[in-house]
């Protein structure tokens, strides 16, 4: 049975055609007919289609009759495409035996091509280079082959040429999957060992676990147990991923599929955890499990306090499908009742924000993201703080520390200078430089996490023109000279905009926040002063001058209704803003404070 | 031009003298006003968005329809104390036609003693005998569409009269006995600098009109002027300059003894303020007749078809020519009351407002009002919220506090 299974993933640099190739494979194998076809089938959230990135791992089973006349089951596992989710990617790849390494024929090997290749190599996967977009007039296959040889260290002649857009080379790819990717190995008789690579929430069935079985069998009625959280559940249903879920009698070693076992929320499962049978557990869990811990914290408030209940419900529902998000009640003097949330990274934060707004029709404001700081008091007591509003004040603090990371960056050598400068500006320390191949380097820096969540990734990508790849692992806490900066609007403190920053950056950050607010807060009928302060000391200020002229010249019989409608519309817009003192602050002003100057 | 056939007319004799003498009554009455929209112009001005047609041969059919509308609306209001004949260009109508209109008004509606009766005229259209006829017919307020005394600006605005014609029109208006004369002027026209505008303003003031409407040029939807702006042919005035024009206009006219009583309106003493227009700004009822005219009463506003053909057709079927109506919610009335009051120097009576709309501005917006006072945009005296001169310049935003 396992002889006829192939588990694979497609990995590529962004925009090299991953979703299009997935669509073609799905179409070719007839899982979906033309009538029901929709582009980017696997990216089924609006937000994924719009941003052109995959956020959740998806799997689909493709039935394929190969040229050898035999029927194969090809399990395609799609992976997320952002560093915030690199752990999820690693678990998805761990569920495969091989990958299609997709390279754009015109653009050639790029940063994520390499980063993804390494991830695949770490998992000992068979790698099939696929050169895509060969129909483009700018396609340069010889150059890409040379790069495959020199930069990737792979056999340049082992590639397959295709144009996913035009449907060229699709069969060659399917054949290569069958012939070159090894079938899964495992013992169906051994105790159950299944790897959870994702989970999603179904409003009728509860949590649907996406898994790859390495050993054993699972079928409805079995009592399964998770290694990490020890909980046991009775299996209700198992099956495979066709375009929809397809129930089956059992899942066996080597297969990719789903398990429904009465779990209420996706938070009951941990990605990377091992599923086994309660009465006959495997000896040890599958390798590679890590508990995803939030590293970025921010508070979410409804724009209108009347919407607090809606936000509560929205978050509860959203959480059903996103185990990585954590939250608890929080309140702000300026913004009222809300929730303090923990995220995997800034992209994760943006996704949560967007999905809450879209899917639950909520209008929300986020406070400035923060990492979790460690303060040691003079009496030796230790306090972890992830909310600047809870900053204890400098007098009682004996020692301030912040979390550091080890940042790994791979890029063409020519960007080294610019990236070094960026890292040093962001307080990077202890750099190491490795030469990977001709013109390609790996740069390692120890950096404060706070500097990385503060727009580092975007800056890095733009400095390296998209050719740099970036990854990080969490390190230790290190002592740091931290201060709290507050932002005041017409003298009133907006606690959601408070930030804990390094003293050397305080003035620049405060000024930047003031200027960002100045750009985003619409003019009012009176002057608005925006100030940045440390304690009582003003360290930055800007002013928004008021309207000077805003009045319609003519307002007679026929003009009044029109004018009123216009005012009503403006009033409605104003209602979606937050009143701080008498100043209306739009939601986007809060977000703008997070961005740096250059994006 | 087709000859006007008034059709069978009731032998209704009006005393024209009784209408020609009046003392202005300043106390803002709650007596409704009557507006007549005469939707004809000889030529269209590229900036104007009021409804009008240039084919004057439709005038007889229009008048038949208008008189039908008057007949149908005659019982809607008890009486009126103002009549405003606007357009369009009412002065393109012959004196005979104008007389018919006024007679029909008299015939169908009751006018208060000393009613204010205004007619708008283009300086190119009028002569002394026409004006004397108007006076005899009871028109006691004449508003001349002068717009500018500067040839270049008149050209830009597409006016068909010259500066000389404007001056002559003013002189004959006085000669004809009009003691309540108003000019319309337009400023911040592309190509007009501050000096050129203040010159025009001084020339206007030199004739000592009782009333001046000074409108900042507004780029209205569906006008040729808008198209020119969209094509990038014309520069937009900066907000700072718009403000300067506005403030200088106000300063110069107040120095000359005019009261700046509404955003764009000035009068020589408050007794010459337009009583009719005041009704728009304090929710006094008004009846508007003619295409596109708006009417208001209580919490209802309705308006006629903005199309001569529809207007005439509806009335030929004895249907009211109403295009649409709205019933204002208390919140909508409140918003209107606020933004309209803040356009006028009379300001907003805070207690009345609070009682009428259950919304205490001082309580709800005290902090904002305090800041606005601090910055000189409003004053509060004796329980009345007044916009200052620079407050009038942002009256629209003030309504959104």
Image (cartoon, coloured by chain):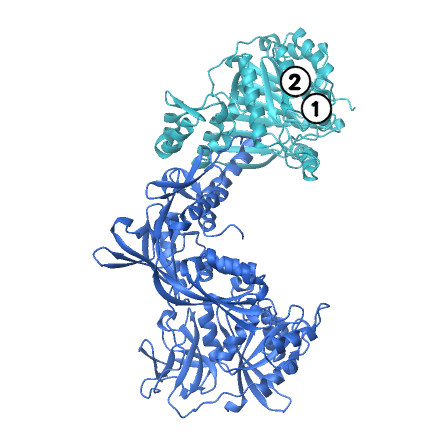
Task: Choose between A237 and B368: the one closer to the eye.
Answer: B368
Q: Is residue A366 above or below residue A41?
A: above
Task: Choose between A232 and A384: the one closer to the eye.
Answer: A384
Furthest toward the bottom, the residue is: A189
Residues behind callouts 1 and 2 on a single chain? yes
Residue A262, quarter of picture: bottom left
Q: Residues within 10 Å of mark 1 (few under 14, many from 20)?
A: many
Q: Picture coordinates of residue A196 (x, y %)?
A: 42, 77
Residue that mark 1 sits on: B153
- Using the image, name the chain to which the residue with label 2 belongs: B
Task: Choose between A306 and A402: the one closer to the eye.
Answer: A402
Question: Are the residues flagged by discs 1 and 2 in contact, CB closer than 8 Å?
Answer: yes
Element assignment for label 2? helix
Element assignment for label 1? helix
Which chain is the one coloured cyan? B
What residue appears at the point 46 percent right and 42 percent down from the top-left corner? Answer: A574
Q: Picture coordinates of residue A375 (x, y %)?
A: 29, 57
């Amino acid at each position: 049975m396992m002889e006829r299974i192939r588990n694979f993933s497609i990995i590529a640099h962004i925009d090299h055609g991953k979703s299009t190739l997935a669509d073609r494979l799905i179409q070719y194998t007839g899982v979906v007919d033309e009538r029901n076809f929709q582009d980017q089938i696997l990216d089924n959230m609006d937000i994924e289609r719009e941003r052109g990135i995959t956020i959740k791992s998806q799997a689909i089973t493709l039935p394929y009759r190969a040229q050898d006349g035999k029927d194969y089951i090809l399990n395609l596992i799609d992976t997320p495409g952002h560093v915030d989710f690199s752990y999820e990617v690693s678990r998805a790849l761990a569920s495969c035996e091989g990958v299609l390494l997709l390279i754009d024929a015109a653009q050639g090997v790029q940063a994520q091509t390499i980063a993804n290749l390494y991830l695949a190599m770490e998992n000992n996967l068979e790698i099939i280079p696929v050169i895509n977009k060969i129909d483009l007039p700018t396609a340069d296959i010889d150059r890409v082959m040379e790069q495959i040889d020199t930069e990737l260290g792979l056999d340049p002649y082992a590639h397959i040429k295709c144009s996913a857009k035009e449907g060229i080379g699709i069969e060659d790819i399917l054949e290569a999957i069958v012939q070159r990717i090894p079938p899964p190995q495992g013992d169906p008789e051994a105790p159950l060992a299944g790897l959870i690579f994702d989970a999603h929430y179904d409003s009728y069935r509860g949590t649907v676990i996406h898994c790859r079985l390495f050993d054993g069998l699972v079928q409805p009625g079995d009592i399964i147990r998770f290694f990490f959280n020890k909980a046991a559940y009775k299996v209700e249903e198992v099956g495979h991923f066709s375009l929809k879920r397809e129930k089956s009698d059992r899942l066996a070693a080597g297969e990719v599929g789903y398990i429904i076992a009465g779990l209420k929320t996706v938070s009951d499962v941990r990605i990377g955890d091992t599923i086994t049978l309660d009465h006959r557990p495997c000896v040890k869990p599958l390798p590679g499990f890590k508990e995803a811990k939030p590293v970025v914290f921010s508070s979410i408030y409804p724009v209108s306090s009347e919407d607090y209940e809606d936000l509560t419900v929205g978050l509860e529902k959203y959480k059903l499908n996103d185990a990585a998000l954590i939250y608890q009640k929080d309140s702000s003097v300026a913004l009222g009742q809300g929730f303090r949330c923990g995220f995997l990274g800034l992209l994760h934060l943006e996704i949560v924000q967007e999905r809450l707004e879209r899917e639950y029709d909520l209008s929300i404001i986020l406070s400035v993201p923060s990492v979790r700081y460690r303060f040691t008091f003079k009496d030796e007591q230790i306090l972890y703080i992830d909310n600047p509003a809870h900053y204890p004040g400098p007098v009682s603090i004996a020692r301030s520390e912040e979390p550091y990371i080890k940042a790994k960056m791979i890029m063409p050598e020519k960007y080294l200078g610019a990236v070094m400068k960026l890292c040093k500006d962001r307080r990077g320390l202890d750099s190491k430089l490795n030469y990977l191949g001709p013109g390609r380097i790996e740069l390692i820096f120890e950096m404060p996490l706070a500097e990385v969540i503060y727009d580092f990734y975007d800056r890095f990508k733009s400095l390296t023109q998209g050719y740099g790849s970036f990854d990080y692992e969490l390190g230790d806490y290190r002592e740091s000279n931290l201060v709290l900066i507050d932002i005041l609007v017409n003298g009133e403190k907006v606690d959601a905009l408070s930030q804990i920053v390094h003293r050397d950056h305080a003035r620049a950050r405060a000024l930047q926040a003031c200027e960002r607010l100045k750009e985003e807060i619409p003019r009012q009928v009176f002057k608005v002063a925006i100030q940045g302060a440390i304690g009582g000391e003003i360290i930055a200020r800007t002013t928004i001058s008021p309207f000077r002229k805003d009045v319609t010249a003519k307002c007679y019989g026929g003009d009044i209704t029109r004018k009123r409608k216009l005012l009503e519309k403006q009033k409605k817009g104003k209602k979606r803003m937050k009143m701080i003192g008498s100043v209306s602050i739009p939601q986007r002003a809060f977000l703008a404070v997070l961005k740096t100057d250059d994006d | 031009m087709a000859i006007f056939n008034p059709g069978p007319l009731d032998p209704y004799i009006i005393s024209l003298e009784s209408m020609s003498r009046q003392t202005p009554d300043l106390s803002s009455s709650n007596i409704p006003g009557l507006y007549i929209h005469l939707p004809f112009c000889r030529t269209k001005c590229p900036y104007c968005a009021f409804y009008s047609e240039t084919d004057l041969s439709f005038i007889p059919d229009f008048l038949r329809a208008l008189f039908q509308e008057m007949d149908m609306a005659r019982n809607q209001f008890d009486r009126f104390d103002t009549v405003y004949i606007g357009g369009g260009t009412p002065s393109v109508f012959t004196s005979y036609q104008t007389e018919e209109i006024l007679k029909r008004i008299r015939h169908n509606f009751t006018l208060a003693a000393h009613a204010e009766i205004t007619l708008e005229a283009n300086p190119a259209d009028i002569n002394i005998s026409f004006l004397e006829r108007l006076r005899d017919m009871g028109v006691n307020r004449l508003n001349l569409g002068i717009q500018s005394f500067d040839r270049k600006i008149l050209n830009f605005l597409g006016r068909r009269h010259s500066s000389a014609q404007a001056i002559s029109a003013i002189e004959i208006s006085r000669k004809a006995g009009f003691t309540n004369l108003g000019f319309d002027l337009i400023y911040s026209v592309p190509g007009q600098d501050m000096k050129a505008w203040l010159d025009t303003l001084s020339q206007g003031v030199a004739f000592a009109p009782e009333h001046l409407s000074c409108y900042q040029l507004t780029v209205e939807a569906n006008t040729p002027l808008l198209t020119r702006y969209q094509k990038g042919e014309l520069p937009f005035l900066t907000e700072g300059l718009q403000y300067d024009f506005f403030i200088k206009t106000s300063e110069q006219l107040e120095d000359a003894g005019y009261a700046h009583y509404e955003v764009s309106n000035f009068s020589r003493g408050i007794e010459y303020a337009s009583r009719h227009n005041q009704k728009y700004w304090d929710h006094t009822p008004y009846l508007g007749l003619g295409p596109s005219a708006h009417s208001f009463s209580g919490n209802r506003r309705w308006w006629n078809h903005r199309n001569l053909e529809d207007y005439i057709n509806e009335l030929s079927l004895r249907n009211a020519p109403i295009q649409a109506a709205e019933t204002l919610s208390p919140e909508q009335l409140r918003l209107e009351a606020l933004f309209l009051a803040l356009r006028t120097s009379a300001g907003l009576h805070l207690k009345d407002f609070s009682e009428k709309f259950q919304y205490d501005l001082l309580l709800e917006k005290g902090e904002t009002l305090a800041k606005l006072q601090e910055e000189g945009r409003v004053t509060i005296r004796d329980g009345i919220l007044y916009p200052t001169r620079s407050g009038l310049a942002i009256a629209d935003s003030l309504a959104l506090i």
